[in-house]
Image: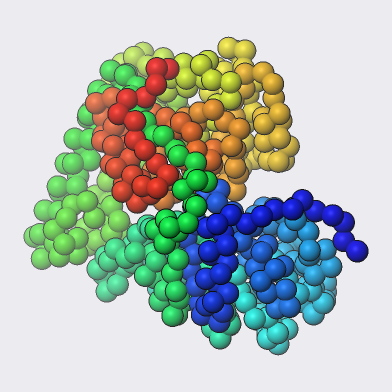
Amino acid sequence: MSESKPKYTPRGYQNYILERISELRGTNLLLELDCGLGKRFITHQLVTQRFPNSKILIVVHSSSSLAETVDYLRKEYGGLEKDLGELSSRIPSARRVRQLVEKRVIVATPQVLASMAATQPGLLDSFEMLLINEVDTLVKRTSSASTLVYPWSTILTVFKDKWLIGMSGTLRDDHAVFTAEQLEIRKELETLKEYITGAHVITMEELYGTDVEEYLEPTFLAMSLVVDARIRSVSLVLDELVRSVRTEIMRDLEETDNLDLVEGDSRRVHLLLERLPVSDDLKGQYSSLLMLRKYVYAMPPKQFLRMFHGDYLKHYFNLSELGRAFHTVSAKTLRVLEVAVNHKKTVVLTSYIEMVKQIRGVLEKSGFSVFALTGASPDKADVLKRFKEADEQSALVMSPVGERDLDIPQADVMVVCDTINTTKTMYQKFKRTRGGLVLLLAYAGTSEERKVRRLLQGVLERYPWSTAILDSPPPA
């Protein structure tokens, strides 16, 4: 007799999804369900209520996600105490075989599942369904020989005759595919349908006739411009250098009748750079300038100034004057402080460890309880728990590695110190707080400001059901 678990009544849109999956039994399916709408609950209902006698493999993209999924299925609502097993690096090889034989529901990481498929393929024959979590992560952002992340080509080949169900918070991004020295921008959904053949797609739009809108947590996005004349001056010079090198690359392509490689579009140069028939010097200059500009926008001055010592840059910048012009503390760090003082719980996302350290130090000196999560953090769950339970004014500062697989609905505001161009990735970051205010910092009058404006427009166009753009941010 299993212990009593909390009773949960499926919401209207969840019942709709479960009914559609039941009706489409045996038909491959791709489900788009936004962050916070219960993909794990759908999974639980499928394995315990809708198909309680079927053997099911659930594939998650990381070890941390596996641990959370197993914990959820085992403890949250029950029904799987004896049926649930796992294939992961923490399970010895001998026990993996026994798990596949004895357990009805298996949660696995792709690497271990592919290994078992290679060594014990017969043990997988009895499984009816392969349920793929975060199915969008199967597709490479840029690809040539294979468009799928390793080892998904192997897994999908092994399970080609099984019932495949893929779930994701979003299926709306593009990815770049190189074919015969050409660049093709494809919809990731079309690529997924190519490999998950005959898949029926359930999108967020299909759920509009249900009660889904009652449960959507709106995210309010605003750009917060940071004024720093020194950063702007450096940025304008770097912008001009980037344009100059890009123009030279385009001229070389034209002279060698290779302009068609970028279809005459200079914006494609960075995607195709390594494949273009131009000199290594030009390629090196272009990529180095792009990276340097990113460092200027995203790092403290002390760190990014170290990158200006190359001979090429000495022609355009006086290093002694630069060193005297910049303060030690980034203007973005000071803006984070201005925002945080007006909120009880602040989440800060930044790309570099140096900024994590600087922001943490400034906030701690101002009396905040500060928690940091990076790739080096030994216990993410404990750090997150202490932040959530803190009664005093507090902040959680995270690097990209540290913030994976985390949900932080307790935050009052999220501050994003720097951005990337991938709309989907940024949207997923914004939704970690499950709605509320997100401020995107950008240096005023720079290419970063233009980049953030494009990003905001892209997010609004692709995810209109849960995002709104504020014309001006609330006062810091």
Q: Residue at x 41, y 14 (%)?
A: 327
Q: Residue at x 46, y 48 (%)?
A: 213
Kindly indicate the quadrant of the structure image that contains residue 161: bottom right
Which scheme is used to colour this image of the protein?
rainbow
Quadrant in which the N terminus appears: bottom right
**Towards the viewer: 190 or 256:** 190
Left or right of 264, for residue 412:
right
Left or right of 388, for residue 241:
left
Image position, residue 57 (x, y; %): 66, 72
Image position, residue 271 (x, y; %): 30, 56
Is 279 above or below relative to 386?
A: below
Image position, residue 73 (x, y; %): 73, 59
**Towards the viewer: 71 or 378:** 71
**Towards the viewer: 450 or 164:** 164
Q: Residue at x 53, y 64 (%)?
A: 16
Kindly indicate the quadrant of the structure image that contains residue 408: top right
Residue extending furthest right?
1
Left or right of 180, for residue 110:
right
Is 401 above or below relative to 159?
A: above
Q: Residue at x 52, y 15 (%)?
A: 341
Image position, residue 468 (x, y; %): 37, 38
Instruction: Examine the rendering and report whether any part of residue 414 can be seen.
Output: yes
Instruction: Examine the rendering and report whether any part of residue 292 can be seen.
Output: no
**Towards the viewer: 77 or 352:** 77
Quadrant in which the C terminus appears: top left
